[in-house]
Image (spheres, rainbow, N blue to C red):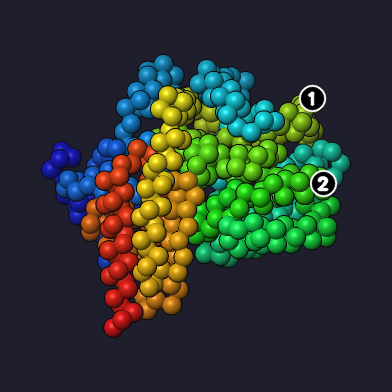
Amino acid sequence: MEWMMDNSTIARRDLDRIWHPCTQMKDHETLPMIPISRGEGVYLYDFEGNGYIDAISSWWVNLFGHCNRRISDAVSKQASKLEHVLLAGFTHMPAIELAERLVSITPPGLEKVFYADNGSSAIEVALKMSYHYHRNRGEERTLFLSLTNSYHGETLGALSVGDVGLYKSVYAPLLIRNIQTPVPTDGSEEASAKALQALEETLSKYGDEISAFIVEPLVQGAGGMHIYHPSYLSGARELTRRYGIHLIADEIMTGFGRTGTMFACEQADVTPDMMTLSKGLTGGYLPLSALLTSDEIYGAFYCDYGGSGSFLHSHSYTGNPLACSAALATLDIFEEDDVLSGNEKRASYMRGWLEKFEDIDIVSDTRSCGMISALTLDASLPVERPGLEIYRYGLKHGVLLRPLGHVIYFMPPYIVEESHIDKMMGTAMDAVLELSKLTRR
């Protein structure tokens, strides 16, 4: 029985058979695997009853806590009626209602919804759709443009438009054509203006070849929680429109309230040609992604079947009813609980904690955007993998932190309370102070 199992037994069974994502499995010769038995609110519990505050929302997906009753009930209710049906030639109410609601809350002009299964898949859809759109109009635009330091997923198309070498470099021979333009160096308007100059130079040189410019609006996630000013998005929208290039807003991480507004694009008052959504879309319950686009782009594929004009892209679980029901329940919580206003108070409390890190000698930078707070450790630390040391310390003290190299970040669920923030960020501070001692030896 599950209650009689211990962590080490479960971990051994896991390591016998499972190859984990984004993991060097050899690390687990010394790094304990943490088997999770259940979740409740901001906590995850292992098989021995130890609780861990989920400070990263389980890879940025869990918005309203683990085993949220309202989302669980919605999924359970749907499971008793319809678990799945193909979305080719068939439809169902959760998919229809979710599409209607997504159109109603995203920037004006995004009128059509194309479902997929996960964030990387949504990016693949966007890249193919952009290229195919231009091709249907008689233009052969085979080049894509993205920001330096960007991350858009790990399938081949998504890797192509990313710029995190750790994930991308080994697969370079397999990737589609892509070039990068500099991301603004910081959150200032001056940095934004300088980066826009570089963007205009790139577009003037390659504009006829570029199909789309893809960006993570305001915050680059896996690129170290790098934050830039909304004015860059405004300028990029104007420039891409001038050159007939699609603007793809990758809101997979930034969407659904994470940056302080429902979608990051709102802070620049822009409507992209395509917007990709996933992660928080279902509150962390089930895999689902969506690409929203305009009637104009949709119309470019509206033709008789056959030939090369149709957009024939599919996933077996596209628009899954259970996942759509979870997403609808998630949107209900946003509407009924005034989540964004509550998040303003949570974010302010987190920023207060973040300021305390600025006095630590090995912290080189702190920054925040909505419900994202981050700090960077000095790159010259005499520790090979400081992030791993922070991770170990956090687990030992009941907090799940998963730094990105030298960057420690906090992205908790939106139900986090001040006492949880104290524990979460206080534990991280203690871990950083322990590392700081190494520099004085």
* Residue with the mark numbered 1: 304
The image shows residue 330, relative to residue 397, as above or below, that is above
* x and y percentages locating residue 402 in the rendered image: 37, 57
Could you tell me the amino acid type at mark 1? Asp
The image shows residue 375, relative to residue 104, as above or below, that is below
Label 1 element class: loop
Quadrant of the rendered image containing residue 396: bottom left
* Residue with the mark numbered 2: 242
Residue occupying the point 82% across, 46% down = 242
Residue occupying the point 37% across, 63% down = 357
* x and y percentages locating residue 318 in the rendered image: 55, 31
Residue occupying the point 31% across, 41% down = 417
Q: Count residues near mark 2 (Cα–Cα under 10 Å), then give few for <14, some for 14-19, many for 20+.
A: few
Question: Which residue, as the protein is rendered here, is positioned at the far right?
Answer: 138
Q: Is residue 357 left or right of residue 279?
A: left
Q: Is residue 254 left or right of residue 62?
A: right
